[in-house]
Image (spheres, rainbow, N blue to C red):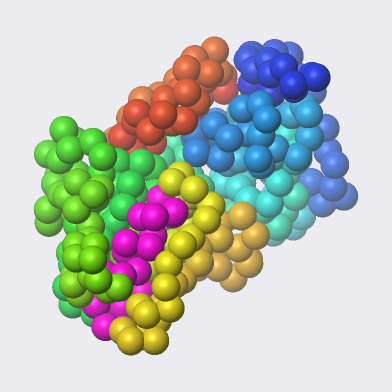
Amino acid sequence: MRAFVVNELDGALVCGLADATAVATDPDDLLIQVEYSGVNYKDALVAAAPSRVRRVATLVGGVDAAGVVVASSDPGLPVGTRVAAHGSDLGVGRDGGFAEFLYAPSRLVNVLPDTISTREAMVIGTAGFTAMASVLALEDHGLGDGEVLVTGATGGVGSIAVTLLALRGHQPVASTGSLQESPWLIDRGAVRVVARDEISDRPDRVLASERWAGAVDCIGGDTLHQVLRSLRYGGAVAASGLVAGTELATTIYPFITRAVSLLGIDAVEATRATRERVWAVLGEMSPLVDFTALIDREVSLEELGDSLDLVRRSATRGRILVRPTTR
């Protein structure tokens, strides 16, 4: 089968289109004929040497995929079922979705709602799943009235978070380093757009002005620190990103003087209950979403290497779809 293979040998990395064989590794593995995959920031980290996240020297990349089950021993996921697969070690420690076929354990496979096509499922992908989980976490916490900051707003998680927040009646403010994309972000539902260095103020104080009712942070590092110090009393930030670094240098003051909360969002080992809830809500909302507007580009496996570099450089807006077949 056609696949995008990542191979590291003695520190040298070779990535590209190759012939590969889909191999089952778990007793409950399902075989999925992949119709679409999507490019995530983690995919760019996997296709790098040295890699902070890749667990094996050689594998098929792609942390998510959508398609149709073609072989299954699970009565809940029979042959012909349209599904999305993502999470755990797909595309990180075992072969992933940048291929024509994918073996995945049933615990990582979700039946797609009737309202979501396999193409739309990968416009959503891991990024959209993370965005929806972030919005639900904020709402569960008690998201009040007021502006909700979204950092990294032109990226996959950020752009979908802006869209979902707006559709659910909130007031997303998009923060980006690509201000030329402001009209596009306004079209996605942002009430306004701010530069990434404008999310906080009063650098001489421990705390900034109370600005945000909540936040979705896709960046991490100092950006997350600035978000925490500028949340309104009782606000929360749903954090899922590490583009700006894995270290968080902050103070205790936002937590003990403004009662703010830091909500960690994990799409990798999410429980089945969380996965089912998120996909169900996405299915309810999908008729309201303009998926086409969220697509940066659609590429073949041959073009995937260049797309990974674009994601690495944060030079995209929205999602990159991958077609593993040559149709």
Q: Nearer the viewer, residue 58 or 251?
A: 251
Q: Is residue 137 left or right of residue 44?
A: left
Q: Nearer the viewer, residue 105 or 7?
A: 7
Q: Is residue 92 left or right of residue 169?
A: right
Q: Is residue 91 left or right of residue 244?
A: right
Reply yes or no: does residue 20 show up in magenta.
no
**Which quarter of the rendering shows the N terminus?**
top right
Magenta stretch bounds: 219-236
Q: Quadrant of residue 34?
A: top right
Q: Is residue 68 above or below residue 270?
A: above
Instruction: Please report the residue visible at 61 percent of the width from the left and 55 percent of the height from the top.
Output: 268
For the image, the number of numbered tags is 0
Residue 286 in percent (x, y) is at: 34, 53
Q: In this view of the protein, can residue 230 be seen by the observer?
A: yes
Q: Nearer the viewer, residue 14 or 75?
A: 14
Residue 122 in percent (x, y) is at: 47, 40
Q: In this view of the protein, can residue 289 be seen by the observer?
A: no
Reply yes or no: does residue 229 show up in magenta.
yes
Q: Quadrant of residue 10?
A: top right
Q: Residue furthest front?
A: 204
Instruction: Please report the residue visible at 32 percent of the width from the left and 62 percent of the height from the top.
Output: 226
Instruction: Please report the residue visible at 57 percent of the width from the left and 46 percent of the height from the top.
Output: 84
Q: Nearer the viewer, residue 37 or 111?
A: 37
Residue 279 in percent (x, y) is at: 48, 59
Residue 324 in percent (x, y) is at: 57, 23
Instruction: Please report the residue visible at 44 percent of the width from the left and 54 percent of the height from the top.
Output: 221
Q: Is residue 216 above or below residue 139?
A: above
